[in-house]
Image (cartoon, rainbow, N blue to C red):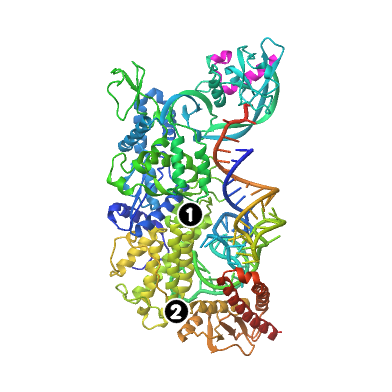
RNA sequence: GGGCGCGUAGCUCAGUUGGUUAGAGCACCUCGUUUACACCGAGGGGGUCCGGGGUUCGAGUCCCUGCGCGCCCACCA
């Protein structure tokens, strides 16, 4: 029954984590409430991954939301699961193969896929165990994986529907090619980085003329693929050259000189080399002018046969040699330093090679418009809403989405090419014969889909779509999405577009975007920097509950958080504080031989009871309001303050003394336990483990707790009550106690000596029993006198409600106010004078009186009266003391 | 080149629609082991809310501007 002296989370957390799962507590069926439905899907972590600190923040915020809704009686579902993470996973397994001296081509596609699945089975569960430790109240019976049969069917269904509507097309276009990943990637999978490079100026001779044109380029190696030079149509310098022919240096190929508006006459020489095979702009220009395309760089970023003597060289080696050759031939006019903007693969940072290839694309314009409309009309709300600007900006400029990947791990594109008639058939299931020519010579497309295609279906594919399942009907659209801002374009917007297109409804009603967790120096956390924080070690060290509240309290809406150890240490102390407060209560339950839950209405006889009741009620209102508006840090802050500084520091301190003084301590239990139990429930979403442990102990100690439920997580979340709680003099009492402590500290009085004191009360009275408590808390033998202070001896502190006078026993200080007190009073006088002056000025200002709300004016008048009374008292004091 | 955000105590940050003496945690100083807790308690010091201008009766909060940071987007070779 008695609690251990220190809280050791390791003793309890694994137990409850397991119990919650074993009892299936978080299946929504367990709580078929009638207070509505709350559903949310986890942003599926990569199977290859392990939990990092960002996940922990994300899951904690989600869990707070989920537990709150569940306790409010809503039918609550949190769907867990993982993403197959195409490129990432394939790379991990390939690395492993490489260590064994193997590569995927040696194994063949089928065997390779088998190996990845094997790997997934082996390591994929790791992250789930980590999520369990976080206390995330997900429904494990509904766990999904993006490559599950059901979800794969959803992928094919979505693909076919988009194809049938003409929203998917296939063709030869320029894409971002990563030579290292050996696949095309989408625009959002590239990052732009500036690097210092050069702008090489190269001279191209004009055929049958003495003239030549100088062209500036950052990529001289591509000149071998040049098929034209371009100038602006109206550039007067080059009007006479339109339609003429230029000679490509080094290899002396003849190329056209064309006019196109893409050229900026003001940049460089106003002449641009056109390489349709290796530059997105040039590709467009090439199409407009029907230019030939010469591919000089291949998929491995090496020069092709078309590059002649440079064949086989890496693109950067070729660059060096070509520059050298141009220099030697005198065709290099100059080299000027230049900051180049490079497109890199976001995954491996390899410089992208723009290449033309046959890929599958999704037409985005219409889908994006629908998604924007959903936000504009308020059907989807962003929290914080300033992120909407970025969302709109991106959606307005969206380009078609390249969804094919030249990988083996992923959803294979449901398209079959006929060797006989060369037609392509898109279908949900593999056709036996070609519907065009009845040939059986069919082969499925080799490419797989971008991972984000399947995760874009996640909110409904996990619920059984395309079937009209009960889950889909009940839980879709989901209520809320909580995720990082960094995947707004990758994931959030795709879910919105695909969700609207596939289901006709939004995938979620609200999107809460949290910030990044950074290290103590505000650095981004990354493996390469070596500043990663392992949440498992963190949970071992501080306890999961402490980590949760520590993260939450530092995480304000959308802002990044700097994770510092001292915050976690303080959080651990907070858990320990709660534990010890409980220890005190349990100790006294035992002492008073209480064996059942106290009954009867909440007793307000003692001023601390009415006070704490009102404070808890305010905290309850504030926490509920904060959670409603996704201000999780505010809710956590409110609770922290209530539990530690109100419940522990004031309420329990007073109650301890009551227990001691009173002959029948039972009288106090109804109040203390009622508040405590409510506080545990209020705290539960934030610190589920310790509150479950304490609540279970409480329920077992006092079994008749009304309507028993098996877990605090299924108990009702407190709601603020509307009825008036009697006002009390407790705040005045607090002031009296504080004033006494200040006087003692200021004047360096003997901390232990009990000193005589007088409280001159202005109209408000403390009961004798309250005076006894003041005595215990301040070591003052307090006498209470109605009226104002008459003789000035002793140490005095004044408030609007009372004057406190201490007759110091020590000869050195007897009868005088110490220097510290004089300083303090002088400071107060100055502040009061300032306030009074300001208040008076405002109150005599006609405009203020006529324009400020009455509440503000009245408030200021009251304040002024108080200031003046206090100022007078303080002045009298100072005067009297010389 | 566009866009977004930030600058508040020594450090990390709160501060809902403008409302009168700007808060927290940590750190710091002083005191205190009264049987829940030293992972504790009490008290204290510390801020021209980045600079400048404006709107307003009133600005940390709204507008403009300067400075300093951070991030995102972008096909000027």
Magenta span contains residue A329: yes
Marks 2/1: CA–CA distance: 36 Å
For label 1, the residue is A551
Q: Residue at x 39, y 48 (%)?
A: A131
Query: Which of the marked residues, 2 or 1, is nearer the chain's N terminus?
Result: 1
**10 Å crowding of disc 2: few (<14), some (14-19), many (20+):** many
Residue A587 on image: x %, y %: 37, 72
Q: Secondary structure at mark 2?
A: helix
Q: Residue furthest top?
A: A208
Which of A662/A727 is in front? A727
Residue A163 on image: x %, y %: 37, 30
Q: How many marks?
A: 2
- A478, above or below A211, in the image: below
Mark 2 belongs to which subunit?
Answer: A
Residue A607, numbered label: 2
Mark 1 belongs to which subunit?
Answer: A
Residue A230 on image: x %, y %: 62, 21
**10 Å crowding of disc 1: few (<14), some (14-19), many (20+):** many
Q: Secondary structure at mark 1?
A: helix
- A529, above or below A610, in the image: above
- A234, above or below A66, in the image: above
């Amino acid at each position: 029954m008695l609690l251990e002296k220190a809280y050791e989370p390791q003793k309890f957390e694994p137990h409850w984590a397991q119990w919650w799962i074993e009892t299936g507590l978080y299946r929504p069926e367990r709580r078929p409430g009638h207070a509505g439905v709350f559903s949310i899907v986890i942003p599926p972590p990569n199977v290859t991954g392990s939990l990092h600190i960002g996940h922990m923040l994300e899951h904690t915020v989600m869990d707070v939301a989920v537990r709150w809704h569940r306790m409010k009686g809503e039918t609550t579902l949190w769907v867990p699961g993982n993403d197959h993470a195409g490129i990432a996973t394939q790379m991990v397994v390939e690395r492993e193969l490489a260590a064994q001296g193997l590569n995927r081509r040696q194994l063949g596609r089928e065997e390779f896929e088998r190996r990845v699945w094997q790997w997934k089975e082996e390591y994929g569960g790791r992250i789930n165990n980590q999520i369990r430790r976080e206390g995330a109240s997900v429904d494990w019976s509904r766990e999904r994986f993006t490559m599950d049969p059901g979800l794969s069917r959803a992928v094919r269904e979505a693909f076919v529907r988009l194809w049938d509507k003409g929203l998917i097309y296939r063709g030869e276009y320029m894409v971002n090619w990563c030579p290292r990943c050996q696949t095309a990637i989408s625009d959002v999978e590239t990052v732009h980085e500036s690097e210092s490079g050069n702008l090489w100026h190269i001279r191209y001779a004009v055929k049958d003329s003495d003239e030549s044109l100088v062209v500036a380029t950052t990529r001289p190696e591509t000149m071998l693929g040049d098929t034209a030079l371009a100038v602006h149509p109206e550039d007067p310098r080059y009007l006479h050259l339109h339609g003429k022919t230029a000679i490509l240096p080094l290899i002396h190929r003849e190329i056209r000189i064309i006019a196109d508006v893409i050229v900026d006459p003001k940049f460089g020489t106003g002449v641009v080399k056109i390489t349709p095979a290796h530059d997105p702009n040039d590709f467009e220009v090439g199409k407009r002018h029907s230019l030939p395309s010469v591919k000089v760089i291949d998929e491995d970023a090496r020069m092709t046969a078309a590059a002649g003597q440079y064949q086989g060289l890496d693109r950067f080696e070729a660059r060096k040699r070509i520059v050298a050759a141009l220099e030697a031939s005198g065709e290099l006019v100059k080299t000027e330093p230049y900051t180049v903007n490079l497109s890199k693969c976001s995954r491996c940072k390899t410089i992208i090679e723009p290449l033309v290839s046959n890929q599958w694309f999704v037409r985005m314009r219409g889908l994006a418009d629908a998604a924007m409309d959903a936000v504009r009309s308020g059907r989807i709300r962003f929290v914080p809403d300033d992120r909407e600007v970025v969302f709109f900006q991106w959606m307005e400029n969206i380009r078609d989405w390249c969804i094919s990947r030249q990988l083996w791990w992923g959803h294979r594109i449901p398209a079959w090419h006929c060797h006989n008639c060369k037609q392509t058939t898109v279908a949900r299931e593999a056709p036996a014969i070609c519907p065009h020519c009845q040939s059986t010579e069919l082969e499925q497309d080799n490419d797989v889909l971008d991972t984000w295609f399947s995760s874009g279906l996640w909110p409904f594919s996990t619920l059984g779509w395309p079937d009209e399942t009960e889950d889909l009907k009940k839980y879709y659209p989901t209520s809320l999405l909580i995720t990082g801002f960094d995947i707004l374009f990758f994931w959030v917007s795709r879910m919105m577009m695909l969700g609207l297109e596939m289901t006709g409804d939004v995938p979620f009603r609200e999107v809460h975007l949290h910030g990044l967790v950074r290290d103590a120096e505000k650095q981004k956390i990354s493996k390469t920097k070596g500043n990663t924080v392992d949440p498992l070690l963190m949970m071992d060290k501080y306890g999961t509950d402490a980590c949760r509240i520590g993260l939450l309290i530092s995480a304000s809406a959308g802002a990044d958080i700097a994770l510092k150890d001292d915050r976690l240490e303080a959080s651990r102390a907070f858990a320990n504080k709660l534990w010890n407060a409980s220890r005190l209560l349990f100790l006294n339950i035992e002492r008073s031989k209480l064996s059942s839950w106290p009954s009867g209405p909440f007793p307000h006889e003692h001023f601390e009871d009415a006070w704490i009741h009102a404070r808890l009620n305010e905290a309850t209102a504030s926490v509920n309001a904060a959670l409603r508006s996704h201000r999780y840090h505010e809710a956590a802050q409110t609770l922290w303050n209530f539990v530690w500084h109100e419940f522990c520091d004031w309420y329990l301190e007073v109650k301890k003394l009551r227990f001691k003084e009173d002959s029948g301590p039972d009288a106090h239990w109804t109040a203390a336990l009622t508040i405590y139990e409510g506080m545990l429930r209020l705290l539960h979403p934030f610190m589920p483990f310790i509150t479950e442990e304490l609540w279970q102990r409480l329920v077992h100690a006092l079994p008749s707790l009304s309507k028993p439920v098996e877990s605090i997580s299924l108990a009702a979340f407190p709601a603020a009550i509307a009825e008036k709680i009697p006002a009390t003099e407790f705040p005045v009492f607090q002031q009296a106690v504080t004033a006494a402590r200040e006087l003692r500290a200021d004047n360096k009085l003997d901390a232990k000596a009990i000193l005589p004191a007088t409280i001159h009360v202005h109209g408000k009275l403390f009961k004798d029993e309250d005076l006894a408590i003041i005595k215990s808390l301040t070591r003052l033998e307090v006498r209470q006198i109605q009226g104002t202070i008459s003789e000035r001896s002793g140490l005095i502190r004044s408030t609007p409600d009372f004057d406190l006078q201490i007759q110091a026993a020590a000869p050195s200080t007897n009868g005088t106010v110490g220097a510290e007190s004089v300083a303090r009073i002088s400071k107060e006088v100055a502040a009061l004078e300032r306030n009074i002056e300001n208040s008076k000025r405002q109150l005599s200002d006609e405009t203020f009186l006529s324009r400020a709300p009455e509440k503000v004016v009245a408030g200021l008048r009251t304040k002024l009266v108080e200031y003046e009374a206090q100022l007078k008292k303080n002045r009298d004091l100072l005067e009297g003391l010389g």
